[in-house]
Amino acid sequence: MNFIRKPSIDLYPGIRVDKNTDLEYTSEYVVQTVKDLVLHSVTHVYGEGYKSTYDTTIQLQEGDILIFESESRGYIKPVEPFTEVQEAIEELECIKNLG
């Protein structure tokens, strides 16, 4: 018998970047830009008795997926792999008779 991790049906808003992706996002916690395949974020974290600021630059590749977190982080490049829903369905169709 073969098993697979149960697929998530949670949907995450986001974008797939290419060399022409040009966006800006600003909230109370973060100011971000994506231009020339570079994600630049200045993030402010507030807590009881402290305030931290993080300045982050991430080099992107064409086809990278950025997931949008509306709570406080804006666009992030996830560590775990993400794919579009249709691509996931096609991959699962390929293995449906193996189990």
Image (cartoon, rainbow, N blue to C red):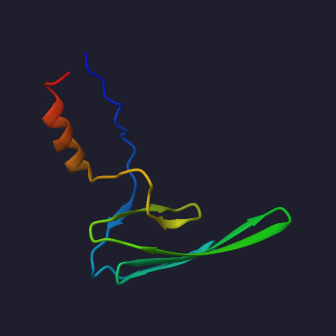
Q: Does 91 appear above or below 74?
A: above
Image coordinates for residue 5, horizontal then vertical, percent: 36, 31
Left or right: 75 with respect to 55?
left
Left or right: 47 with respect to 41?
right
Query: Residue at the location (36% across, 51% down)?
Result: 81
Q: In which quadrant of the rendered image does the C terminus lie?
A: top left
Kindly indicate the quadrant of the structure image that contains residue 94.
top left
Q: Residue furthest right?
A: 49
Q: Does 93 appear above or below 49?
A: above
Decide which of 56, 51 is in the foreground and name it. 56
Decide which of 32, 10 is in the foreground and name it. 32
Q: Residue furthest top?
A: 1
Image coordinates for residue 41, horizontal then vertical, percent: 54, 76
Q: In which quadrant of the rendered image does the N terminus lie?
A: top left
Left or right: 66 with respect to 25?
left
Query: Residue at the location (56% across, 65% down)?
Result: 73
Image coordinates for residue 16, horizontal then vertical, percent: 30, 66
Q: How many marks?
A: 0
Image coordinates for residue 29, horizontal then vertical, percent: 63, 71
Kindly indicate the quadrant of the structure image that contains residue 35.
bottom left
Query: Residue at the location (41% across, 50% down)?
Result: 80
